[in-house]
Amino acid sequence: MIIGVAYYPEHWDRKRWETDCALMRDMGINTVRMGEFGWSVMEREEGKLDFSLYDEAIGLLWEYGISTILGTPTATPPAWLCEKYPDIYMEDRDGHVRGFGSRRHYCYRHKGYLQETARFVRAMAEHYKDDERVVAWQIDNELGCEDEVRCYCDDCRAAFIQWLKEKYQTLDVLNEAWGTVFWSQIYTKWEQIPFPKQTVVDLYTGTGHNPGLLLDFAEFSSDSLIEFAKVQCDILRSLTDRPIVHNVVSEYCDNYKLTALLDGAGYDAYPRSEWDLNSPGRIGFHYDLTRGYDDRKPFWILEQQSGPCGWNVLGRTPKRGQLSLWSIQGAARGAQALVYFRWRSCLFGAEQFWYGILDHDGLPGRRYEELQSAVAGIKKYEDIFEMKAQRQVLVLYDYYNKFSLEFQPHGRQFVYKEEVIGYYEAMMKLHLSIDVGGLETDFSPYQMIVFPFACMADEKITKKLEAYVRHGGILVLTALSGRKKRDNQMWSKTQPGVFRELAGVTVEEFDSLEEQKERIVWQEGQDRTPMTARLWCEILRMEGAEQLAFYEDLCETGKNGEEGGNGNRPVISVNRYGKGSVYYIGAVLEDTEKALEKVCIREGLERPDLPTEIECVTKENSKYRILLNHGSEKKWIQMEGYKLLGEISGKCKVKAVSVDCESEKTEENSEIGKRGIVLEAFASAVFVQA
């Protein structure tokens, strides 16, 4: 396994390098990532290439047993290049040019920059192609991580028109797909098609452009990024057999399509920063999503938080033990590379506050020692970490639904990705084994598939889901499903559109709740479980499905003047389809975990009984389970059928506790208690089947 760190030799005096190399070796670092922001060091003036600084650094690191991942530095075109091409910059929706001064300050479609990128990447690859010390290449850095993907410059407009011509061939086909008869938008020349810039209605509704135009522009912009990446991948593949990776983090790109170019998909993990206070579930979602872009390829963590961080404002300082736990969370999910960001906190530049393993003084301290211990724990159980995780539940995440619901979210506070993560987090708290993937994923290994907010859907995905359920699969659909076709037009079918037969329900009415909430009751026999709807709710009509939950305050009285029976307003249902089951949750829930727990109980899905603060990663065939305590307090747990193999980080003690699990007892008094494990705050451990 690669245990690495981002290192910037250009930031430090050469006299310091050997000290850094020795400290890295002693910590357990075997690889560094460098070069991704070094264009102006390698080519200070146009045509004057000089790789000597990196040659020297790579050589010294190698002497200490440390290999190198080289980054192509195209995220930061130097000042001389931007001076040469004054129109290189991207233009935003308001017509503002995003100029020099930060990073990612270029348009992906700029012909001059594409040529310069190809020239420089080829020269860099030629120089290092036979260097055994270079074990991988990272193209660029965090493509699309800033608001630079959707560019509105003249180059992009011309390229967009050409993209539309290739997709639709004729204007008649485009006009039909977009429904341009609405508002007299029928196009008779390609040049008439607008760019989705500001309109007269944008101030009060976000955008007034045609939904078909908006979706196509989002896909075109995604393709622009992917084509820029392909230029680099093609050059590298022609010159080297080293793996090509990238930190895939963009919200504006079809990352499944981007990953097809790569040998491994990477993610940059920052649970705490200036912008983020991420829960373990949010980070877990991104790890599993990155792995799910193509689970046949390695999953890498190309940046792992190693200290407090921010650009102008600092995020929370990680508590003692959290850095270790975050490292192990990624490794436990099968990451084949864990690269910390960064080695030493920089003394200058926009990331002065982005702390690394070492502080600005360069002295090893608490973070160094903590991560040194974490690395040792990861290496000890590396064979177990590398095993495939158990495949139990698949969450479907689709970028085109994301794009559609970004432009038309149905409610002002609805955010597709956040709501999908809500489902993931609920299942993580229920200790289910979860994968995340796209619509092309093989469904057959999974007991349950959750397809949240599938607003756009066609008959292709419907048939695939029907076959899955017919053979015994469990499917969970949610509100907003089946409203649109894949071209972003509404279905004329009764909602939930293509899912109507599969779900066995129709949507009778719906409401965008905004700030309001509706009370829900899940009732089976005498068991009544309260839940809450927020943002969006639908009233269902049963067409073969069984009602499971109803709106408490939207009930009509029955024939005898009592609530219940046919007078209820259904919101959650289950339909038996072939050998399987389809659940339809007709609201955005405040307490998704409750509903999914009910589904798990009904369907008999196996899951360990653990506190919600404990994350459980179950490896293939359930032989091993890795537990991580994300809570700030110790937790007492029982692992029926498993025994403690060992601690990874922190402390894990075998103790006897009272039956109510509240007070610890001594070993001598263990006969009056239950024997279990106490997992300290931010600790992790491996268990094996007894």
Image (cartoon, grey):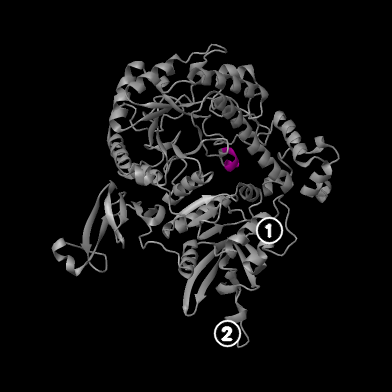
Q: Mark 2 points at which residue?
A: 562
The percent position of residue 669, horizontal first and vertical second, equals: 15, 65
Relative height, residue 22 to residue 430 (above, below) = above
Q: Measuring 41% from the left and 40% from the top, which residue is drawn there?
A: 315
- Residue at the spot 27% in from the left edge and 36% down from the top edge: 369
N-terminal label among 2 and 1: 1
Relative to 373, say whether 409 is above or below. Answer: below
Position of 276 with respect to 382 (left or right) is right
Residue 24 falls left or right of residue 392: left
**Amino acid marked by disc 1:** Arg
Residue 205 seen by the camera: yes
Residue named by callout 1: 483
Image coordinates of residue 689 in percent, x first then y, are 32, 57
Asked if residue 570 lies in the magenta stretch, the reply is no
Q: Position of residue 664 (x, y in %)?
A: 21, 62
Q: Residue 154 — which label?
A: none
Three-letter amino acid code of the residue under disc 2: Glu
Comparing marks 2 and 1, which lies closer to the viewer?
A: 1
- Provide the residue span drawn in magenta: 253-258
Q: Is residue 687 left or right of residue 341?
A: left
Q: Around disc 2, counting alpha carbons within 10 Å, would you say few (fewer than 14), some (14 to 19), or many (20 or more)? A: few
